[in-house]
Every structure is written in structure tokens, then in C-alpha cells.
Image: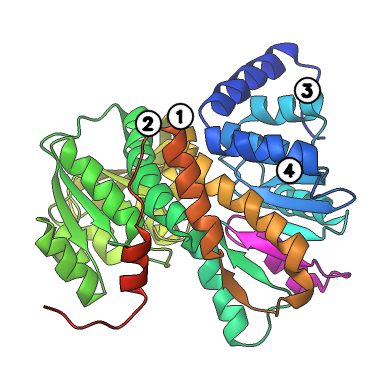
Amino acid sequence: MDFDIKDRTLRKEGKRRIEWAIKRMPVLELIRERFKKDKPFKNINIGACLHVTTETAVLVITLKEGGANLRLCASNPLSTQDDVASSLVFDYGIEVFAIRGEDKKTYYKHINSVLAIHPQITLDDGADLVSTIHKKNILPLPWGGTEETTTGVIRLRALEKEKKLLYPIIAVNDAYTKHLFDNRYGTGQSTVDGIIRATNKLIAGTTFVICGYGWCGKGVATRAKGMGANVVICEVDPLKALEAVMDGFQVMTMREAAKKGDIFVTTTGDIDVISKEHFLLMKDRVILANAGHFDVELDLKNLEKLAVKKREVKPLVREYTLKKSNSIKILYVLGEGRLVNLACAEGHPAEVMDLSFANQSLSCEYIVNNFKNLEKKVYPVPEHIDKSIAKLKLEAMSVKIDELTPKQKEYLCSWQEGT
């Protein structure tokens, strides 16, 4: 490992935080107890490229308890929690290749270290592990893999469309118990949390511009509105734009919003969402943040060219000074334009990741049991897995729901005349 596992203070803090997360992830705990007995991953290598956080720690511990030989690397250079990585190595015997703030060369070195065990199953967050396998044509190919994010699923579906996908992938991101909760409640809360932690900015009364009104954008919009912001949505999809209007938000072009916003957040997964022309239109002291997986949504290359001066004014807050004629204005970029909820905060709450990682673990088990029958396609999470996770979560929350009577089930499954 590339970090000092002998640092007892760091390791102790990591273990304490992992134990805190374990207690808040009851669904994964139930799965882990079964995995301990059944050992579904005995003699199976699993390679994971995920955010190295306390919640991820609970997932990889669960897979190891199920018998897996597992290696973990980071899916984002700024999301790694070094104390968690240290504890996973020393206290749980899991090989981790991740350092917070690692450069690009180290990042891919760590990915290659994970692939060195020739995993039968891959877990990805952004599809960098899968893309490395494809670029290097690493053999033998995995039996299958899972993908956690919208961005990763988009990349993998593009490969499938071109008939270049080399092995089957389960799109965990698209499970109802993932995207409806992780993206909406997790991203919504943790993105605003990251902005506040980095800046201590009062949200109430600001004009808060959100680019993209998918599930992540909806979550951020709801939380920002709840804190008193005047929320503006920028969209390219007419259906989503109309939905945002009906939800009570202002909708306008990015060019219009650039002149009005105080805080900007991108949630699209696309490149150059906020670009040079928008920077030039912005007010003084604007805050710019990204909640998409890759650091491409803010056009930072052109912002660098526009700036006559830049400096770090706070940890993970970079100040850019722009000069036009005799006027000067300042723009602030949070977390180097990377995922603000993980770069500047702790990411999604454990209660949300409980659902996402329950999907990950059960999808891995599904791959082990079914990989011989799977094609080189992107598959949805099987519906029975999705529903079983929802049921377990409700039980953990002491929530009871009704059941259909036999008569009701029969009625719904048959054609009958109305009254």
C-alpha cells in the first residue's frame, strides 16, 4: 500500500468511522450475515474501483465476509478518506490502493494494481476500471461487473451500442432503490453539505442555479429550495424543463442564468456545461461547483486562460481573478471541479448507501450464479433484487405496508368488465 498503515491514530479513527457506518446500514448488515454463512464468493477475485469512504468500506467488508479475495482502488482522487483506507488494510485485511489527492499517473497505477488479480467480478463507479480492461485488452475477461453511476452507465451503453462491450454489466445505478434514493436524497443533501462546508455560505436568499434536472438535479433543487434559495434550472430536455417549471422552479438558458446566479452546480455528466461565455457574464464572487462524476462539466481550461490570477483561499476553494477593461471580478471553484459532495464533504449518508451497496452486493451474487447465461450487454438490476432490498429497508425502519388479497391479485391479472 502507498500510505502509512502504521499510523495508529489514523487507523483508529478510520475503524471508528467504519463501525459508525455499519450501524446505520441495516440492509447490508442482513446481507453480510447471510454471506458469512453461504460464502457465495469463495475462491472468487473481485476488483473494485469506488469512492474509498466509510460506506464503501462496509460494502467491501461484506464481500470479503462472503469469501471474496478483493482489491479496492479509488474512483476519484479527491474522494478517498485515508483513515478509512488505512483501517481497511490493517484491521480488515483488505488490499486498498488509494491516496487522497493522488495524481493521474498514480490513479491509473492503482487501477492496474486492482486488475493484477484478474478479477472475475468488477465493481465500478464511473467505468474507469472497465474502460482500462477494454483499452488494454486484459485477459482473462471478468465474468461480469456492476456500475454505480449515471455517467458510467452512459459510457457502458455506448460501448454496448457499438458492440464493443467485452463482458456483461449490471447497471446498479438504474435500480429504483438506487437512483430514486441515492441520486435524489444522497446527492441532494451531500452536494449542499459540500458547498456549505467549503464556503460557510448562507444559502437562504441566494440565486442557486442547477444545470440538469435529472434525479441528482431534482435532489439538489429540493434541498436548496428548502434552505431558502431562489432556484433556477437549466435544461436541454424539454420534458425535464417542463417538469421543473411544474415543480415551481424558474427555468432559463445558461446564458440567462449566468448573469443572475450566486451559486452554480452542474449535475449533467456532460462536458463544458458552464463555459467561457458564461464565466464572462457572471457576477463578482460567484461560487462554482460540480456534482457530476467527472471534472469536465466546468470548462476549467478556459477559466485558467481567462484568469489573470488564481490562488487557494481556503482548502478546496480556488479563487480566479478575471479582468475585463478596468473591471475585476472573482469566481470561486470548489473541489477542483470534482464531485463537490465527496471532495468537500463526506459523500452520501450511510442510510442512502445502504440501498445502493445492497444492490451492489446482491448483483455480484447474481453474476456468480448466472454469468454463463449472460450476454455482453448492460443489464438492469433484476426486479426481485430491487424489491427485496426495498422490503428489507422498510423492515429496518419498522414500516409496515399492506398486501394484496388473493382476490385483488386475481383481478389485476385478468381482464374484467368495469361496473
Q: Nearer the viewer, mark 2 or mark 3?
A: 3
Is residue 105 or residue 331 the one in the foreground?
Answer: 105
Magenta region: which residues?
A: 124-147
Mark 2 and mark 1 in contact? Answer it, CB < 8 Å.
Answer: yes
Is residue 380 or residue 398 the one in the foreground?
Answer: 398
Using the numbered discs, state the Cα–Cα distance from disc 3 to disc 4 in whole angstroms.
Answer: 15 Å
Using the numbered discs, state the Cα–Cα distance from disc 1 to disc 4 in whole angstroms.
Answer: 35 Å
The residue tagged 2 is 198
Image quarter of residue 130: bottom right
Amino acid type, label 3: Asp
Mark 2 and mark 3 in contact? Answer it, CB < 8 Å.
Answer: no
Using the numbered discs, state the Cα–Cα distance from disc 2 to disc 3 in whole angstroms.
Answer: 31 Å
Residue at the location (37% across, 31% down)?
Answer: 198
The residue tagged 1 is 315
Using the numbered discs, state the Cα–Cα distance from disc 2 to disc 1 in whole angstroms.
Answer: 7 Å
Is residue 285 or residue 379 the one in the foreground?
Answer: 379
Q: Residue furthest bottom?
A: 162
- Nearer-N-terminus badge (2/3): 3
The residue tagged 3 is 91
Disc 2 crowd rating (10 Å Cα; few below 14, some 14-19, many 20+) is: some
Q: Residue 63, labelled with which disc?
A: 4
Amino acid type, label 2: Ala
Is residue 324 left or right of 367 when viewed as pictured? left
